[in-house]
Amino acid sequence: MKFVEDSRIKISRKVLALAWLFFALYLLFIMGLSYLLGIRPLIWGLPRWVAIGNIVVPAVFVLLLILVAERFIPDIPLTEDEDSEQEE
Amino acid sequence: MNLAVVSFLAYTALLIAIGLWSYRIVEKVPISKYEKEFYAAGRGLGGIVVALVIAGGLASAGTFIAGPGMCYEYGYSWVLINNFQIFMNLLLLAPIGIVVGIVARRVNALTYLDLFKARYQSRAIIVMLAALVTIFLLPYMATQFVGAARVIAQMTGMGYLASLALGSLVVLIYCVLGGMRGTSLATFAQGIIITIGCLMLFIGTVKYAGGFQRATEIIAAQDINFLSPTMGGQFSPVFAFSIACMTGFFVVGMPHAMLGALTYRNTRALKKGIWMGGILVFLWTFLLCMAGVIGRSIKPDLAVSDEISPWLAMNVMPEAMSGIVLAGIVAGIQTTVAAMAIIITSSIAKNLLKELKPGVSGQQMKLASRWTMGACLTIAIGLALFQPKLIQWIIFFSIGGLEAATFGPILLGMFWKRGNQWGAISSIVWGMIVYALANTAVPQLRLWGSHPSFVSVCSAAVVYVVVSSFTARPSDETARTFWGQAREAYK
């Protein structure tokens, strides 16, 4: 099976790794803080682990996602006709 | 007729209008391009619509009815569990979005089974997956109708049957007539209504409860475990992690989520779909789940926990606003049904029919698509007549089953050149056997209290690798089509 691999497939693999790493980090933070922070003192009237682990952490990661998606996923053509794709 | 009913009927009329308008567009398309238009909306969806199609498809009655219901029943522990699903757009579009986008255009794949056909060249896989998708998605779809019917019944005071008819008829119209075009247009309108509805419900509930502090104190007085991340040990971190895998890492195995990957226009739309989906699902999940927990401080003795969101909408909000909130909840459910209807129809009417009757004409295919979609929705409505009580567990069961069957063959099939049809078939069969055993005779397979999907998906992926390694490599043509440079792909 000898052929030259399409460079876009390599990019696709990197994007897969990036997405899984991002989600793994999110899980680490949300689960770590939720299980370790405890209930009191309340923050904004909510248990401490809810306020930090389940409001601050998801909000920060959602904002980070904009940066990650726009910065690290390149614009690449999906068809073989690159010019027409880039015009869109 | 109260204002809530009027605003809900206005929303329903909007969806019917979208269905009829889409029908006119689809009907104008030449028969040679009909399939591409009906199943993939001409492969021209922009970022916002892609975000909504995936987020709306994956965020089902589980998010809008059962999620708040579980938070009402088990306190803040389920806010944590529901928060795992926030990045499902990322975990679907980033891992396979680009490669699916490239290959789908190369082989003119309009459905996810077209991709399987191109990758594995196996009739057995198409038949097995078409059957499994139908088996798992129909009850899933039925739970969506149950959720919608309960909301409408609460709001209008109509009986369950009449509510079921009203909630499902409108989906039937815009899906059957408009296909993916109608579905995407409806999903766009519904996404706006869902977001507004969730915001209004959250603000109305917090205000009515007298703020977070007061609500938390009342809930703690009822049972201090409501404030615990494990509900006093009832939901272990391992169980939570297995749910995180099911609604996160394994989400590529959800066939109805694949619609977004098959229909987006370009990588700019893909990127927008990823981050906009994150924002939307976070808002929907967080706002509704928090409303569900806080709702316990307002109404602690609700007989059916799943009814907390419609109850709050009807009792803590002004009448006209409650109609918009309920329309938002029903909209969230309808988007899922629509995505599932497209997937089941494409599996049966396009892929299975073509496998069994290769010479089928374009006109016959068009008729088969509409009749199959109508039949599937009718069966799901029929199943909804049984009115199951705990829809969240049925939803998890269906998601787990789909992922156990398809996760390995989709993800590994897209990236691992050595993977072949024997690996895929073994993986599907193994995944189904382990999943069935873990759910019935051998509960010990739920390792350390994890959800049955966890061990099924992981072991099925291992089986895919092992069997593929010891059997013949896929053809050179397949390898070039999937991973070769453009010129090589067409050799």
Image: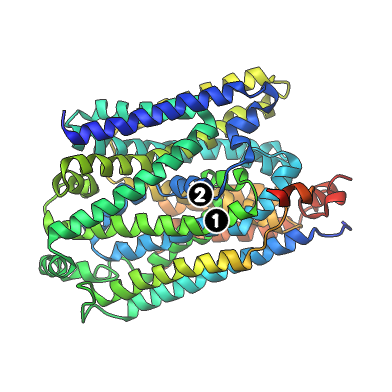
| Identity of the residue drawn at 63% across and 18% down | B364
Q: Relative to residue B26, is residue A50 depicted above or below?
A: below
Q: Chain of mark 1?
A: B
Looking at the image, do the residues carrying marks 2 and 1 touch, with CB atoms under 8 Å apart? yes
The type of residue carrying mark 2 is Ile
The type of residue carrying mark 1 is Lys
Q: How packed is label 2: few (under 14 Cα within 10 Å), some, or many (20 or more)?
A: some
Instruction: From the viewer's side, name the closer residue of B194 and B433.
Output: B194
Residue B250 visible in image: no
The image's colouring method is rainbow
Instruction: From the viewer's side, name the closer residue of B324 and A14.
Output: B324
Which sits earlier in the primary sequence, circle 2 or circle 1? 2
- State the mark number for residue B48: 2
Residue B74 spot, x, y in % from top left = 24, 61
Residue B381 spot, x, y in % from top left = 37, 29
Residue B164 picture quarter: top left
| Identity of the residue drawn at 16% across and 65% down | B211
Q: Is residue B362 left or right of residue B49?
A: right
Residue A30 spot, x, y in % from top left = 40, 72
Q: How packed is label 1: few (under 14 Cα within 10 Å), some, or many (20 or more)?
A: many
Residue corresponding to mark 1: B272
Where's the C terminus of chain B, which quadrant?
Answer: top right
Residue B39 visible in image: yes
Assign a secondary structure to mark 1.
helix
Q: Chain of mark 2?
A: B
| Identity of the residue drawn at 46% across and 45% down | B57
